[in-house]
Amino acid sequence: MKKPNALLLATTLGCTLLSATALAAPPMDGDKTKEEVKAMLSQHDEAMNKQDAKALMMFYADDPNVVLMGTGPGEFWKGRAAVEEAYKQFFQDFKAGTFKHECPEASSGHDGNVAWVIASCNMQDVTPDGEAREYVLNVSGVLRKEKSGWKFQTLHFSNLTGDDMPPPEDMEDAPAQEDGKPAPKTQ
């Protein structure tokens, strides 16, 4: 199966992590902030699935220093114009309306006019040529409250790129070092 490129991952990050994180957090009776953030993330998801870059930019802070960041070199978009252009590039990698996700690991919180979300998500989508894809995406975001509501100040996504996989947890399955001994276990 073809792996998604890093730009695609950035696209799915917003729609995936963030709404999943807000939804995965245990509901707190009367927590107006969590409900507001959850509604904002849901609206972001709708704009993402419609591939509406202008609508997506409504969910970013009115700040020249907003940032969207990916996994590798060059995946750092600072400023509203750069972030919007990145979204337009992401749209070339998937069919509108094909995002599906489940985020079994998620957390969120808020303090005053700042909120944060973080999740590890199992993603699915479809390429423009009809190929179904599955991959894991880690995402995090910091939001701030403006007069018009909650907005992203930063959004970050990451995933494994290429065919590299994390080292096996079992030392017996670990690749050998140059001296033939098993590689040390990493945490």
Image (tube, helix red, strand yellow):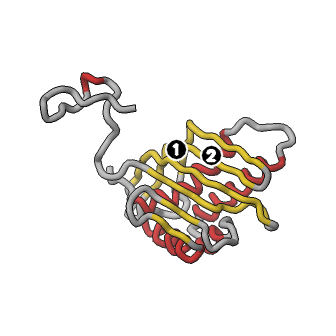
| Coordinates of residue 62 in the picture (x, y in percent) | 69, 72
| Coordinates of residue 49 in the picture (x, y in percent) | 58, 61
Quadrant housing residue 143: bottom right
Name above or below for residue 103 compared with residue 43: above
At 50% across and 54% down in the image, what residue appears?
Answer: 157
Task: Residue under label 2, please give it.
Answer: 20
Left of 46 or right of it: where is 172?
A: left
Q: Earlier in the sequence, mark 2 or mark 1?
A: 2
At 18% across and 33% down in the image, what residue appears?
Answer: 177
Image quarter of the C terminus:
top left
| Coordinates of residue 158 in the picture (x, y in percent) | 46, 51
All told, the count of numbered labels is 2
Left of 183 or right of it: where is 2?
A: right
Name above or below for residue 18 compared with residue 86: above
Quadrant housing residue 30: top right
* Nearer to me, 132 or 169: 169
Task: Residue under label 1, please give it.
Answer: 121
At 59% across and 74% down in the image, what residue appears?
Answer: 80
Residue 9 marker: none
Q: Are marks 2 and 1 in contact (CB under 8 Å)?
A: yes
Quadrant housing residue 182: top left
Left of 23 or right of it: where is 166?
A: left
* Type of amino acid under label 1: Cys
Number of other residues with Cα within 10 Å of mark 1, as a class: few under 14, some 14 to 19, many 20 or more = many
| Coordinates of residue 61 in the picture (x, y in percent) | 68, 67
Query: Cα distance, mark 2 to mark 1?
Result: 8 Å
